[in-house]
Amino acid sequence: MPEFSSGIQQVIDGQGVPISVAGMTIVFSVLTTIAGFIAMLPKVLEWVNKVLPESAHHGPTSRPVPKTMPAPVTGDLSSIAAAALAYHTRHFQGTTTRDDTRPRHSPA
C-alpha cells in the first residue's frame, strides 16, 4: 500500500496550486455567467413577449354565472342534524376531539 504524505511541499511538487487556481477560475466564471443570465432574464422575456405574444387560451375566460341561486334551506332541520349525527357516529366512533375533553354542562 502506498504511503501518503501531506504538507505544502507535496502540494507544490504535485502542481496542486495551479490546479486549484484553475478550478477556482472555472467556478468563478460559471457563477458570473449564471448571475449575468439571471440579471438579463427580465429583458430577454420582454423581448420574447414582443416577438411571441401570449395567445388566447382555449378554455372559457371566466366561470359561468348560475342563472338562479339555490333556494335556502327552510323548515325543520332535525333530519339534517340526525343524518350528521349518524354519519359522525358511524365514521368517528371511538375517536376523541378537543371538545370531548371539556367538562359537559347540563342545560339550565
Image (cartoon, helix red, strand yellow):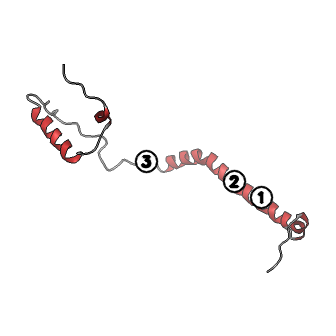
Report the front residue among 75 and 51.
Answer: 75
Q: How many marks?
A: 3
Quadrant in which the C terminus appears: top left
Comparing marks 2 and 1, which lies closer to the viewer?
1
Q: Residues within 10 Å of mark 2 (few under 14, many from 20)?
A: few
Report the front residue among 100 and 49.
Answer: 100
Q: Residue at x 10, y 36 (%)?
A: 79
| 29 lies left or right of 74 | right
As shown in the figure, which amino acid type bears the numbered disc 1? Met
Write down the residue under mark 2.
31
Choose the circle earlier in sequence order: 2 or 1. 1
- Estimate the x, y position of residue 73 in percent, counting from the top left: 13, 31
Furthest residue in direction left, as rendered:
75
- Estimate the x, y position of residue 104 in percent, counting from the top left: 25, 28
Q: Secondary structure at mark 1?
A: helix
Report the front residue among 40 and 82.
Answer: 82
Write down the residue under mark 3.
54
The disc placed on residue 24 is 1
As shown in the figure, which amino acid type bears the numbered disc 3? Glu
